[in-house]
Amino acid sequence: METTSVKKTKGERIFQAILVLFMLFMIVITLYPFIYVLLSSISDSRQLISHTGLLLSPQGLNLDAYVKVFQNPNIIGGYVNTIVIVVGGTLLNLFMTSLGAYVLSRKGVPWTRTVMLLIVFTMFFSGGLIPMYLLVNNWLDLGNSLLALIIPGLISTWNLIILRTSFEAIPDGLIESARMDGAQDFTILFRIVLPLSLPVMAVMVLFYGVSHWNSWFSAMIYLRDRELFPLQLILREILIQNSTAYMSGDASASDVEAVGESIKYATIIVATLPILAVYPFLQKYFVKGVMIGSIKG
Amino acid sequence: MRFIAKDYRRHKYLYFMIAPVILYYFIFHYVPMYGAIIAFKNYRIADGFLGSSWAGFSHFISFFDSYYFWRLLKNTLLLNLYMLLFSFPAPILFALLINEIAGKKFKSMVQTVTYLPHFISMIVICGMITQFVAREGVVTDILVWFGMDRTALLGHPEYFRAVYVISDIWQSVGWGSIIYLAAISGINPELYEAARIDGANRWKQTLHITLPGLAAIITILFILKIGNMLDVGFEKIILLYNPSTYVTADVISTFVYRKGLGGTNEFSYATAIGLFQSAINFMLLLAANRFSKKVSENSLW
């Protein structure tokens, strides 16, 4: 807001100082839980349990927890399933959302407004959890398959709106001249509109991708076979339901509980590392996407 | 009909392209809406959709009469109230503060860091929460240092709402501020110039220019929140609650989940409650919108 600084009053200087301190506090508060988890994951479980208070360094540095995590076939399986869901799901999401956004962004087509209203209405009213469950599981018989995780969420209306806004911004002139050259809508979409929309498509990939990566509830209610469980569901067993017993090979009960602690932390790191790793690079795309969506939506 | 035929010839491929999209919305959004009719039946899987007998409003009545109704309603509304009081304003205040940061690099670093928790999955977040407020957890340690008795926080109903709301603020204050920062950047800088010339300091500028400039987006988001009141965040509650905290943690959505998918297969009953939720939410949405139109120029539509 201020480009040239007029002389700062003492009050303003104090305010800035307190502001900086507060922001540093926010940064610490945001990051410390992750640091705590990381340190705990490379600590010895028994020492971890007896330690109280803030953790500033690993207690008995060892990587046992990680060894146990990677030895667990469920975790590897969970990773594979999640990757399949993320890749396959996101591709389908992009395909369907692009089709919808393209058609609904065309001017001069009278029914697009009605269709848009019908679609937006679904954001405010729905049949509820049970009818959806019965539909997917019983009436369509998609239960216990990865399709149940992908198909019900094929299009996110919010993302559709963002993409449509972006497609609307493509200059009519380009489209018109393509049409005069004889191009039909499919060609226009794939050869002109999409190549010009790569940044917002990247945002779509990120939004849908992260959503698939983090999702767990659908998997929990629809899947019955362990081999199909995505990573988050395996995590849920370990973190929330405390089922670490099968992961440790130790005999005594206190050993089982002890090993469990650092394994939980290691599991969190293993599951979150991909997101943490790509996040700094992709963050600005996310922000841009939200800004486009919020201003128009 | 003739109109469609003529339009079809002009825009043939658009029809092909929109068909799967319309099919998707029809099957996965409108069919379930119709399927909610089972709330008025005694749906049994064996009898099927058409074969199940009619129950009229009996499921609704039995819900209102049920032992848990007032508790569920109270928990749902109270949790919402706390969210609206604390979790809703937090990103706004945070955005205002971020806006005041002088150093560009520092500002952008603060934002990058505070957006991070939003991307972590709810399972991991709840896993961390469970660890941190456990009997030997780090947050418990800090609270004990301040004088609290040592105990696992998630085992006690009186702590549930605090844990829920505070962790929600932690996770969403950064990301939530984006939309407000975007709105602030849209405010005409000349307004600030004029105010400065008139001698207004930053505080006065914030009060008289920034906040009114945010009024529109705040109102819209607030109306939307009201329109979701009976749904309050149930995935997170499912991950954090347990029978000993049902007294404060069990909300309408989690009750619906347990009744419908918890093994007793009370599909019609659960659907009825779900319909009740949707209906009330919709009415709240309309009411909030109308009220907002009356007192200000801002509304959802």
Image (cartoon, coloured by chain):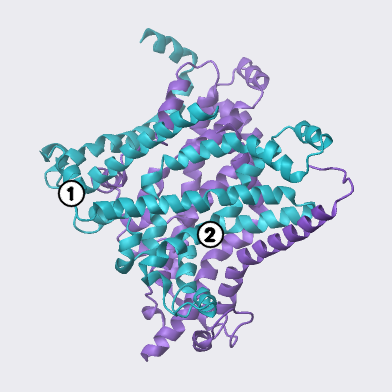
What residue would you read off at disc 2?
Answer: B120
Label tally: 2
| Residue B193 appears left or right of A147 | right
Q: Separation of disc 1 and disc 2 at Cα? A: 40 Å
Q: Quadrant of the C terminus of chain A?
A: top right
What residue would you read off at disc 1?
Answer: B65
Tell me the purple chain.
A
Q: Quadrant of residue A25?
A: bottom right
Relative to A243, residue A21 above or below: above
The answer to whether residue B84 is seen in the rendering is yes
Residue placed farthest to the bottom in the image? A252
Residue at (89, 48) in percent of width and height: A7
Q: Quadrant of residue A280?
A: bottom right
- Residue A217 percent location from the top left of the image: 38, 55
Which one is earlier in the sequence, the residue at label 1 or at label 2?
A: 1
* Residues at discs 1 and 2 in contact (Cβ within 8 Å): no
Q: Give the chain of mark 2.
A: B
Tag 2 secondary structure: loop
The three-letter amino acid code for the residue at tag 2 is: Ile
User: Which of A65 and B119 lies nearest the eye of the viewer?
Assistant: B119
Q: Quadrant of the N terminus of chain A?
A: top right
Tag 1 secondary structure: helix
Relative to B45, residue B137 above or below: below
